[in-house]
Image (spheres, helix red, strand yellow):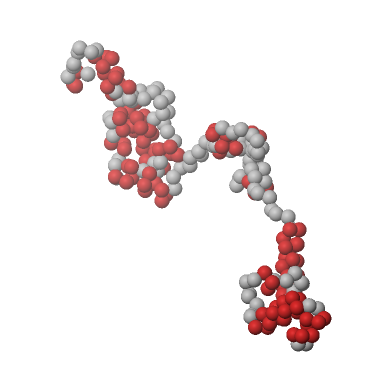
Amino acid sequence: MNFNSCQKLWGTSTCISRSIGSAKNATTPLNAYSRTHFSSQATLHSENEQNKMTLSKLVEKEVKAKPLNPLPTFGSQWGKYFSDGSRRLSFNPNQVLKPSDLQLENLIHPADRESRKPRPVVRRPPTKDEVRLTDPFLYYNINILKEPYNPDLLANFITPLGRIKKRALTGLSKGNQKKVSKAIRRARCMGFLPYFGKPLERYSEDHQQRRDGPGVDLPPFAR
């Protein structure tokens, strides 16, 4: 189509504008960042991209469908019992606690507190190997029968009521335990030890001050 035919059919202005516009489209390249570059038509993806999208959607569905594990609380099974089997008290979320409530003796169930009380220590006599370290007379090779006139030494093996202590308390060997009891009986017969009680009060400084008075200072041989 030439220029003259355009004037006859559609007019001069319309044909010139169309020809100019077609010439621009043919010569000038389309800008990648222009608005005309993006179209509203649906883009076609490859099969791999479609598979990736479907897998991601499946994973999202599985994650959403799986319930989350609840946070651990004081009343859960893992913290409900102590190592010895005693029950542990549980607390409510809105409960007000004191610092003393978090102590070990207060965390135990009241029904199980009696079983957790400390039991008295059951002492036993020392063995042959232990006697070498617990018997001072055997360690230093001392004959206790030669010390009946030493009340300070023998008073360590007497109770406050005047009874002779057992081997489980003294830690002596069988032979030295018999010698100590014999030395205590000899000291009592000679008057160095009382039959009832311990002679420690006679040798204490408080007893000497009460006996002598505040203004009297007797020599050691007169006391």
Q: Residue at x 56, y 37 (%)?
A: 102
Q: How many marks?
A: 0
Q: Is residue 128 above or below residue 62?
A: above
Image coords of residue 21 (percent x, y)? 70, 78
Q: Report x, y in % for residue 85.
A: 64, 44
In the drawing, does residue 103 fall left or right of residue 42?
left
Q: Quadrant of residue 191?
A: top left
Query: Hey, which residue is sitting farthest right in the picture?
Result: 9
> Which residue sits at x=61%, y=35%?
113
Of residues 211 and 46, which is closer to you in this image? 46
Indicate the quadrant where residue 89 lies: top right
Q: Can residue 213 be seen in this snapshot?
A: yes
Task: Identify whether 206 is placed above or below 91.
Answer: above
> What residue is shown at x 82% (from left), y 81% (from top)?
9
Return the residue found at the far bottom: 2
- Asked whether, in this view, residue 139 is left or right of residue 49, the answer is left
Q: How far across and how far down the image is residue 107, in percent?
A: 60, 37
Q: Is residue 148 visible?
A: no
* Nearer-the-camera pick, 46 or 42: 42
Q: Taking 124 as reference, is 27 left or right?
A: right
**In terms of image quadrants, where is residue 105?**
top right
- Provide residue 181's location: percent of width, then percent of height: 38, 34
In which quadrant will I find the N terminus?
Answer: bottom right
| Quadrant in which the C terminus is drawn | top left
Q: Nearer the viewer, residue 112 or 164?
A: 112
